C-alpha cells in the first residue's frame, strides 16, 4: 500500500480533531476531538514504521505507549469534566472563564487602602471563591 | 591568682554582670540588683588588690595575641603601672557607689534592669581603657563608653531635652573620635605598633615623624571625650540624664578617659611643643570660660557640669606642662569629690523638689532636712574650691606647682609659654571656682522663705555612699607625699608660693561672692520663684525628671531663671547674659554646622523624592501599562488560547521551512 493513503487519512483525521478542539463548545466533545488528533498521530507512526521497515518497530511500540497514555488522560479528563459539571451545571467551555483577567483584579495590595474600588475587588474575589467551591 | 589574672577579671566582671543583667532583667527581676552591685563590688575589691600588689613599682605587662591581624598586630595587652591601678580603683569604687545609689534612686523605674546593665557595661569599658596596653583595645572601650553614654543620658527619653542631649553627646564625642582614629593609625604607621610600651619606646628613640600632626589629631578625640573647649558643649546638656549617671560620667568614666589617655601617651604629645601649647590654650579657655558659665547657671546640676569642665581643664593644663602625675592626682581626687557633689545634688533635688537654685534660695531648712547631703556636699565644695586640707587643695596645688616650675624654667618638659598660660588661667579659675562653689552652697542651703516641705526620709543606700566617698574627699590629699612614687616620681607636694597665692585668691573669690549674696539676698523676697515637683512616696528619679521638665516650662530655658537675687548676676554684670548660654557656642554651632547639614538634608530629600523617585516610579508605571495591554489577551477561553498556539506553531513551521530553503539556496 502506498504511504500516501494512510498519510492523507491521518491528516484528515487530525484536521477533524483540530476543528473539534477549536470549535466545539462541549468539553466532552473537545476531549473526543483530542483523541481523534492523537489517533491521527498513531496512524502516522504505524504507517511510517511499516514503510521504513524498522527492525525494532519503534513506531508500533510508541503507538502502544500513546494509547496507554491516552487512556489514562481521558480518564482524568472525563473525571474533571464530570466534577465541573456537578459544580456548575454545565460543561460548556465558553462559560468556564474563571481565569479571565478582569478590571477588578487591577487593585494592588499596596494601594488598596487608597483605592475606592477595594470593596468591589473583595466582592469579586468572594464571588470567585463561591464559584469554585 | 597572679596579678595579671586579677587585672583581667576587673573589667570582665562588670561586663559579665551587664550581660547577665540584660539576660535575666525581664524574667527574674529579683536578680537584677545583685547582678548590678556584686560584680562591680568584686571588681572594686580586685582593683584594690591589684593596686596593692603592683604597689607603684615596675609596670606589669602581659599580652596575648588571639589572631594575626596584618601589618600592625593587635594584642590583648595589659599595662599595669601606678596610673592604671590607681585610676582603676577610683573607677570601681565610684561605680560601686553609683550602683548602690541607683538601687534607691531608680527603685521603681521600669527600665532599671537595662539601666543597671548599661552602667555595668560603662564601668567595664572604662576599666578596659584603663588597663589596656594596646591602643586598639583601648579604642574598643572608648567607643563602648560613647554608646553607653548615649543610652544613659537618654534614660528619660520621654522628655525632649533628654533625647536631644543624648544625641548631642553622641555626635559631639564622635566628631572628636574621627580625627582620634586617624591619629591612632598615623601613630601606628609611624611607630609600627599599637602597643603602648612599644610606642613609647619608639618615641623615646625619636621614631616619630609627624609628632605635631598626630598629637593634634589625638587631641581632637580627647577634647571630645574629656569635654574640653571647643567640644565641651555636650556635657552641660548631658545633665538631662539621671543624677547617678552624671556622677558616673563626670567622676570616674568617660570624661576621665581623655585625660587618662593623654597621660598614658604623654611622651607622644611632649614630642611636639606646638601640641602642648595648643593643649595649654585649650585648657586655659576651658577653665576660665567654664568658671564664668558655672557662675551663671540656675540648674544645680549644670553648675556642677561646668565645674567638671573647669576641673578637667586643670588636668589638661597639668598635661600641657608635661606633668602627668599631677593630672592623674587631680583626676582621682576630683573623681571622689565630684561623685559626692553629684550624688548629694540628687538628694538635694529630691528633698527640694526642684533643680533650680533660684527656687532653692527661697526655701529654708533644706540643710536640716538632709543633714548627710548637707555635710558631705559642704566638704566636697570645700575640696572643689581647693581649701586645705581637703583633697582638691593638694591635687590642684600639684597642677599649679607644675605650671609654675615650667613657667620659671625649672622644668623643661614643656614650653614656658604653656606654663605661664596654665598658671595665670589656673589662678583665675581658682577665683571663679571658689565663687561658684560659694554661690551654690549659699543658694542651696542658706535660702530664706517658706520651710521646705517634708519629702520623706532619704533612703540609706543614697546617704551612706555619700559618706563613703567623703572619706577620700577629705583624706586623699594627705597621700600627696607618697603618691609621687606611684607616678613618674615627681613630687606632688604643694609649694609655699602657689599655696598661699591660690588659697588667697580662692578666699577672695569666696568672700566677694558672699558679699554679693548678702547684698542681693534681700531682693529674693520680692520676686517669688518656685516650681516644685513633690512626690514624697515615689522614687527620687521621678522628681528629678519632672523638675527638669518644669524648669523649661517655668523659666523658658534649662539654664537660666529670671532671679534678681542671684549673686552670680551681680558679679558677672553684663557678662551674665552670655555666660548663661555658655557664651553662645551652641548658637554658633547651630549656625555653622546644624543649619548647613539641615539644608543639605533638604536638598538630598528633594533629589531623592523628586528626581530619583521619578525614574523609579516611571519604570513601574510603564511596566504596568504594558501589563494592562497584555492582559486583554487573557480571556479565559481555552479555545482562544489553543487557536493562538496553533497560529504560532504554523507561523514558526512556515518560517523554519522558508529559512531552510533560503539557506539551502544560498
Image (cartoon, coloured by chain):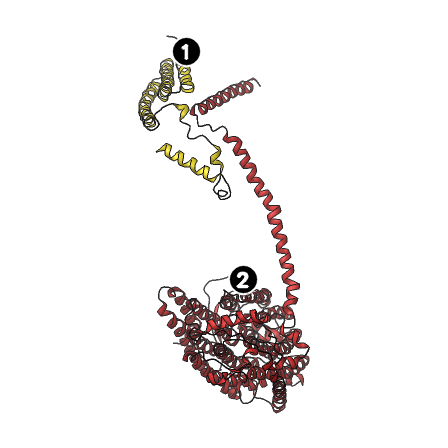
Question: Would you name the residue on which mark 1 appears?
Answer: A8
x and y percentages locating residue B324 in the rendered image = 57, 79
Report if residue B487 is visible in the image. Answer: no
Where is B368 relative to B115, above or below? below
> Residue pushed farthest top?
A1
Looking at the rendered structure, the secondary structure element under dot 1 is: helix
x and y percentages locating residue B394 in the rendered image = 56, 86
Where is B216 relative to A25, above or below? below
Which chain's residue wears label 2?
Answer: B
Dividing the picture into quadrants, the one containing residue B420 is bottom right
Looking at the rendered structure, the secondary structure element under dot 2 is: loop
Visual hue assigned to chain A: yellow
Which of labels 2 and 1 is toward the front?
Answer: 1
x and y percentages locating residue B578 in the rendered image = 66, 73
Report if residue B18 is visible in the image. Answer: yes
Dividing the picture into quadrants, the one containing residue B103 is bottom left
Q: Nearer the viewer, residue B193 or B225?
A: B225
Amino acid at each position: 500500500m502506498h504511504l500516501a493513503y494512510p498519510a492523507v487519512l491521518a491528516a484528515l483525521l487530525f484536521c477533524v480533531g483540530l476543528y473539534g478542539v477549536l470549535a466545539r463548545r462541549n468539553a466532552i466533545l473537545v476531549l473526543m476531538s483530542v483523541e481523534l488528533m492523537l489517533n491521527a498521530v498513531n496512524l502516522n507512526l504505524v504507517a511510517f514504521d511499516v514503510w521504513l521497515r524498522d527492525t525494532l518497530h519503534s513506531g508500533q511500540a510508541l503507538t502502544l505507549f500513546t494509547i496507554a497514555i491516552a487512556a489514562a488522560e481521558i480518564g482524568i479528563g472525563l473525571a474533571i469534566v464530570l466534577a465541573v459539571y456537578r459544580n456548575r451545571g454545565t460543561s460548556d467551555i465558553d462559560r468556564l472563564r474563571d481565569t479571565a483577567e478582569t478590571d477588578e483584579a487591577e487593585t494592588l495590595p499596596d494601594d488598596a487602602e487608597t483605592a475606592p474600588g477595594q470593596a468591589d475587588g473583595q466582592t469579586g474575589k468572594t464571588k470567585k471563591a463561591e464559584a469554585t467551591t | 591568682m597572679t596579678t595579671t589574672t586579677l587585672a583581667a577579671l576587673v573589667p570582665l566582671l562588670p561586663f559579665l554582670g551587664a550581660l547577665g543583667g540584660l539576660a535575666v532583667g525581664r524574667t527574674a527581676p529579683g536578680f537584677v540588683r545583685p547582678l548590678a552591685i556584686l560584680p562591680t563590688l568584686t571588681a572594686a575589691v580586685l582593683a584594690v588588690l591589684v593596686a596593692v600588689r603592683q604597689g607603684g613599682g615596675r609596670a606589669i605587662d602581659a599580652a596575648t595575641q588571639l589572631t594575626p591581624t596584618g601589618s600592625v598586630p593587635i594584642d590583648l595587652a595589659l599595662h599595669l603601672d601606678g596610673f592604671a591601678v590607681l585610676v582603676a580603683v577610683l573607677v570601681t569604687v565610684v561605680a560601686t557607689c553609683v550602683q548602690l545609689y541607683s538601687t534607691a534612686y531608680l527603685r521603681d523605674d521600669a527600665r532599671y534592669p537595662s539601666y543597671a546593665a548599661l552602667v555595668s557595661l560603662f564601668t567595664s569599658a572604662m576599666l578596659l581603657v584603663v588597663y589596656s596596653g594596646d591602643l586598639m583595645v583601648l579604642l574598643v572601650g572608648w567607643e563602648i563608653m560613647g554608646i553607653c553614654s548615649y543610652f544613659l543620658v537618654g534614660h528619660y527619653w520621654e522628655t525632649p531635652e533628654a533625647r536631644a542631649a543624648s544625641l548631642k553627646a553622641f555626635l559631639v564625642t564622635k566628631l572628636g573620635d574621627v580625627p582620634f582614629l586617624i591619629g591612632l593609625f598615623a601613630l601606628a604607621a609611624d611607630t609600627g605598633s599599637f602597643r603602648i610600651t612599644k610606642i613609647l619606646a619608639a618615641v623615646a628613640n625619636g621614631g616619630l615623624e609627624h609628632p605635631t600632626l598626630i598629637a593634634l589629631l589625638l587631641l581632637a578625640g580627647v577634647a571630645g571625650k574629656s569635654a574640653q573647649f571647643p567640644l565641651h558643649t555636650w556635657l552641660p546638656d548631658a545633665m538631662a540624664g539621671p543624677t547617678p549617671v552624671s556622677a558616673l560620667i563626670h567622676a570616674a568614666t568617660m570624661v576621665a578617659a581623655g585625660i587618662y589617655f593623654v597621660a598614658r601617651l604623654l611622651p607622644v604629645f611632649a614630642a611636639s611643643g606646638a601640641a602642648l601649647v595648643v593643649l595649654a590654650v585649650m585648657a586655659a579657655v576651658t577653665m576660665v570660660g567654664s568658671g564664668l558659665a558655672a557662675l551663671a547657671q540656675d540648674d544645680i546640676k549644670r553648675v556642677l557640669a561646668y565645674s567638671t569642665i573647669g576641673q578637667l581643664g586643670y588636668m589638661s593644663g597639668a598635661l600641657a606642662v608635661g606633668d602627668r602625675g599631677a593630672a592623674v592626682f587631680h583626676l582621682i581626687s576630683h573623681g571622689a569629690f565630684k561623685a559626692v557633689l553629684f550624688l548629694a545634688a540628687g538628694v538635694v533635688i529630691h528633698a527640694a523638689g526642684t533643680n533650680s537654685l533660684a527656687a532653692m534660695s527661697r526655701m529654708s531648712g533644706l540643710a536640716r532636712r538632709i543633714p548627710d547631703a548637707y555635710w558631705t556636699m559642704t566638704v566636697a565644695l570645700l575640696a572643689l574650691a581647693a581649701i586645705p586640707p581637703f583633697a582638691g587643695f593638694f591635687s590642684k596645688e600639684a597642677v599649679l606647682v607644675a605650671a609654675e616650675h615650667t613657667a620659671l624654667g625649672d622644668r623643661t618638659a614643656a614650653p614656658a609659654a604653656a606654663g605661664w598660660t596654665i598658671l595665670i588661667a589656673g589662678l583665675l579659675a581658682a577665683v571663679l571656682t571658689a565663687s561658684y562653689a560659694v554661690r551654690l552652697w549659699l543658694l542651696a542651703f542658706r535660702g530664706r522663705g517658706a520651710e521646705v516641705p517634708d519629702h520623706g526620709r532619704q533612703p540609706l543606700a543614697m546617704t551612706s555612699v555619700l559618706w563613703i566617698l567623703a572619706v577620700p574627699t577629705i583624706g586623699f590629699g594627705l597621700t600627696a607625699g607618697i603618691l609621687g612614687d606611684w607616678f613618674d616620681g615627681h613630687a606632688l607636694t604643694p609649694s609655699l608660693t602657689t599655696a598661699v597665692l591660690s588659697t588667697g585668691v580662692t578666699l577672695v573669690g569666696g568672700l566677694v561672692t558672699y558679699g554679693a549674696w548678702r547684698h542681693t539676698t534681700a531682693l529674693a523676697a520680692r520676686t517669688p520663684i518656685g516650681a516644685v515637683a513633690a512626690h514624697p512616696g515615689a522614687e527620687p528619679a521621678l522628681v528629678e525628671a519632672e523638675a527638669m521638665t518644669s524648669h523649661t516650662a517655668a523659666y523658658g530655658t534649662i539654664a537660666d531663671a529670671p532671679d534678681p537675687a542671684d549673686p552670680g548676676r551681680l558679679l558677672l554684670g553684663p557678662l551674665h547674659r552670655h555666660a548663661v548660654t555658655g557664651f553662645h557656642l551652641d548658637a554658633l554651632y547651630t549656625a555653622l554646622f546644624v543649619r548647613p547639614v539641615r539644608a543639605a538634608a533638604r536638598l538630598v530629600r528633594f533629589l531623592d523624592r523628586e528626581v530619583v523617585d521619578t525614574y523609579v516610579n516611571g519604570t513601574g508605571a510603564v511596566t504596568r501599562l504594558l501589563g494592562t495591554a497584555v492582559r486583554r489577551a487573557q480571556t479565559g477561553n481555552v479555545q482562544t488560547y489553543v487557536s493562538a498556539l496553533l497560529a504560532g506553531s504554523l507561523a514558526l513551521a512556515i518560517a523554519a521551512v522558508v529559512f531552510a530553503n533560503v539557506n539551502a539556496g544560498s
